[in-house]
Image (spheres, rainbow, N blue to C red):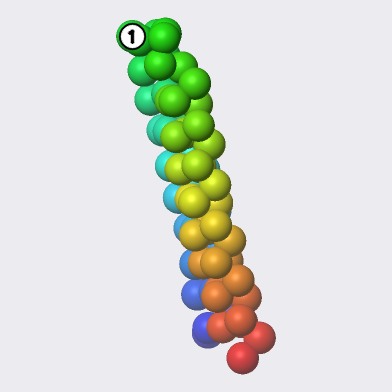
Amino acid sequence: MSAGFAGVGAGLAAIGAGIGIGRIGGSAVEAVARQPEASGDIRSNMILTAALIEGVALFAVVVCFLVLIL
């Protein structure tokens, strides 16, 4: 039973990370279109936020796999 829930949890973590990074990218493109002179700051903030989201998603997937093993 926990194997099914672990798989669902890992899938939801991956989907959530994909949606979050997609929204960040879209918002960054809109921000650069509105204020091109701030593109460097926007890009660095976007990369930092995407990296944090990926870290949280990886942590969630690892926890799901640990639940699967234990």
Q: Quadrant of residue 6?
A: bottom right
Where's residue 12, x and y in %?
48, 58
Where's residue 15, x and y in %?
50, 49
Q: 28 or 67: nearer the eye?
A: 28
Q: Can the viewer see residue 47 in this picture?
A: yes
Residue at image location 35% in from the left, 10% down from the top: 35
Residue at image location 45% in from the left, 34% down from the top: 45
Where's residue 26, x and y in %?
43, 24
Q: Secondary structure at mark 1?
A: helix
Q: Image check: 24 left or right of 1?
A: left
Q: Which residue is mark 1?
A: 34
Q: Residues within 10 Å of mark 1 (few under 14, many from 20)?
A: few
Q: Quadrant of residue 64?
A: bottom right
Residue at image location 61% in from the left, 81% down from the top: 66
Q: 68 or 28: nearer the eye?
A: 28
Quarter of the C terminus within the rendering: bottom right
Q: Can you say whether 19 is above or below 60 in the image? A: above
Residue at image location 55% in from the left, 67% down from the top: 59
Q: 22 or 55: nearer the eye?
A: 55
Q: Amino acid at mark 1?
A: Arg
Q: Image check: 2 left or right of 65?
A: left
Q: Image check: 59 left or right of 49?
A: right
Q: Quadrant of residue 34?
A: top left
Number of on-image labels: 1
- The residue at the far bottom in this view is 70
